[in-house]
């Protein structure tokens, strides 16, 4: 699966919130600067994440964003779904095959693709934000880098 920018930026923003927003709300501008994400694009993503109840926003001088739930309660699948990334690389192939009328030989192939798609979806929803955060920290530590996300 290839993630589009919107999906990639949403995961980066959520990882930033795990690190930065433990004690206080973090502005979209701060996240955008740290993660090198265009601010106007990030604001649209944050709105989608708020609508999906993954983040909460606070207005005002001390306002910004925080995770609405613990990182261990937020899955990669939920983040991608919130920003309109269905995470189904095989869905269009499966739907096209069904629409065209599947031949007997193709039905076996279609069944395999459907099983792979189900396994992929399960994997997306099994990976938590907490696990992603831990993996990012471990990778950066192995590279000798300071953790930025």
Image: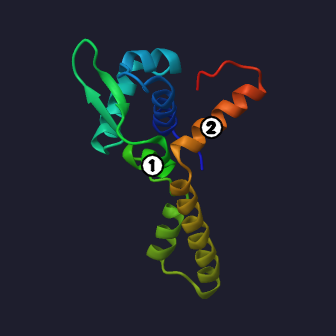
Question: Relative to the observer, which residue lies in front, 30 or 70?
Answer: 70
Residue 118 x/y as whole percent: 54, 68
Q: Position of residue 17 (x, y in %)?
A: 45, 29
Characterize the local packing of mark 2: few (<14), some (14-19) or many (20 or more) Cα atoms within 10 angstroms: few
Decide if residue 112 is on the left or right side of residue 92: right
Query: Could you say whether the residue bearing mark 1 is in a helix, strand or loop?
Result: helix
For residue 90, which numbered disc appears in the image? Answer: none
Measuring 61% from the left and 67% from the top, which residue is drawn there?
116
- The residue carrying mark 2 is 134
- What residue is disc 1 on? 73
Circles 2 and 1, Cβ within 8 Å, touching? The answer is no
Q: Residue at x 42, y 15 (%)?
A: 30
Sequence-wise, the earlier of marks 2 and 1 is: 1
- Secondary structure state at the residue bearing disc 2: helix
**Residue that extends furthest to the left in the rendered view of this protein:** 60
Position in image of residue 23 (x %, y %): 40, 23
Q: Residue 49 occupies which quadrant of the picture?
A: top left
Disc 2 and disc 1: Cα gap in Å?
Answer: 14 Å
Q: Residue at x 48, y 80 (%)?
A: 101
Say which residue appears at 51% left-offset and 32% top-offset. Answer: 15
Towards the viewer: 61 or 24? 24
Asked whether, in this view, residue 56 is left or right of residue 128, the answer is: left
Relative image position of residue 60 (x, y in whole percent): 22, 16
Extreme residue toward the bottom, this view: 104
Figure check: 99 above or below 9? below
Graded by Cα atoms within 10 Å as few (under 14), some (14 to 19) or many (20 or more), the crowding at tag 1 reads few
**Image quarter (top left, top right, bottom left or bottom right) of the C terminus:** top right
């Amino acid at each position: 699966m290839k993630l589009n920018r919107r999906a990639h930026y949403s995961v980066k923003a959520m990882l930033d919130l795990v690190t930065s927003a433990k004690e206080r709300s973090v502005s979209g501008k701060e996240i955008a600067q740290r993660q090198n994400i265009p601010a106007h694009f990030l604001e649209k993503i944050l709105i989608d994440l708020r609508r999906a109840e993954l983040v909460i926003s606070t207005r005002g001088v001390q306002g910004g964003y925080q995770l609405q739930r613990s990182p261990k309660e937020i899955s990669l699948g939920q983040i991608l779904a919130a920003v309109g990334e269905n995470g189904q690389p095989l869905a269009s192939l499966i739907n096209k095959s069904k629409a065209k009328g599947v031949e007997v030989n193709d039905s076996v192939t279609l069944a395999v693709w459907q099983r792979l798609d189900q396994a992929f979806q399960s994997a997306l929803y099994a990976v938590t934000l907490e696990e992603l955060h831990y993996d990012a920290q471990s990778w950066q530590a192995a590279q000798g880098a300071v953790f930025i996300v």
